[in-house]
Image: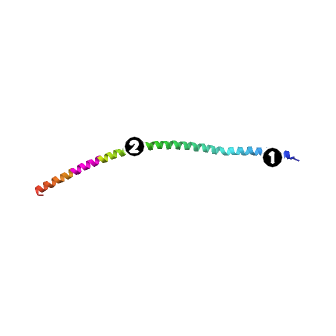
Amino acid sequence: MLTKNDLNQIRSVVKEEVKNEVADQVKMGLEPIAKDLSDVKKDLSDVKKDLSDVKKDLSNVKKDLKDVKKRVKKIEKTVDVVIDHFDREIVGTQKRVGKIEDHLSL
């Protein structure tokens, strides 16, 4: 018959073996997760790099847009000046034509 000491020794051996087996199973289960995590980290790094590139491009677009806005304002001012000039010319010409028509009784 087994003594209490023998049972305790068997228990500790079984406990150690179960512990080792569970640790091995956990390790084997974690390997695919670690690989997937590595892939996710790489993808995240790529996304961060792409986002950085997009931010740089957006900054350049903002600068270009400011330049375009300035140019459009300048063109609008020029168009306003040209329109005012031709409006005055047309009004002056209309007055002259009116006087000529009155003089010629047309």
Judging from the image, what secondary structure is the residue with disc 1 in?
Answer: helix
Q: Which residue is located at x 65 percent, y 43 percent?
A: 31
Where is the C terminus found, in terms of image quarters? bottom left
* Label 2 sits on residue: 64
Amino acid marked by disc 2: Asp
Q: Is residue 12 left or right of residue 77?
A: right
Q: Quadrant of residue 99?
A: bottom left
Residue 34 in the image, given as x and y percentages of width and height: 63, 43
Q: Quadrant of residue 25?
A: top right
Q: Which residue is located at x 48 percent, y 42 percent?
A: 53
Q: Counting other residues with Cα less than 10 Å from the Cα at mark 1, is it few (<14), some (14-19), or many (20 or more)?
A: few
Q: Is residue 106 magenta?
A: no
Q: Nearer the viewer, residue 19 or 80?
A: 80
Q: Which mark is residue 73?
A: none
Judging from the image, what secondary structure is the residue with disc 2 in?
Answer: helix
C-alpha span from label 1 to label 2: 77 Å
Q: Counting other residues with Cα less than 10 Å from the Cα at mark 2, is it few (<14), some (14-19), or many (20 or more)?
A: few
Q: Nearer the viewer, residue 42 or 12?
A: 12
Q: Is residue 86 magenta?
A: yes
* Label 1 sits on residue: 11
Q: Residue furthest right?
A: 1
Q: Which residue is located at x 71 percent, y 44 percent?
A: 23
Residue 49 in the image, given as x and y percentages of width and height: 51, 41
Secondary structure character of the magenta stretch overall? helix
Residue 43 in the image, given as x and y percentages of width and height: 55, 44
Amino acid marked by disc 1: Arg
First of labels 1, 2 by sequence position: 1
**Magenta span:** 78-88
Q: Is residue 4 left or right of residue 40?
A: right
Q: Which residue is located at x 86 percent, y 47 percent?
A: 4
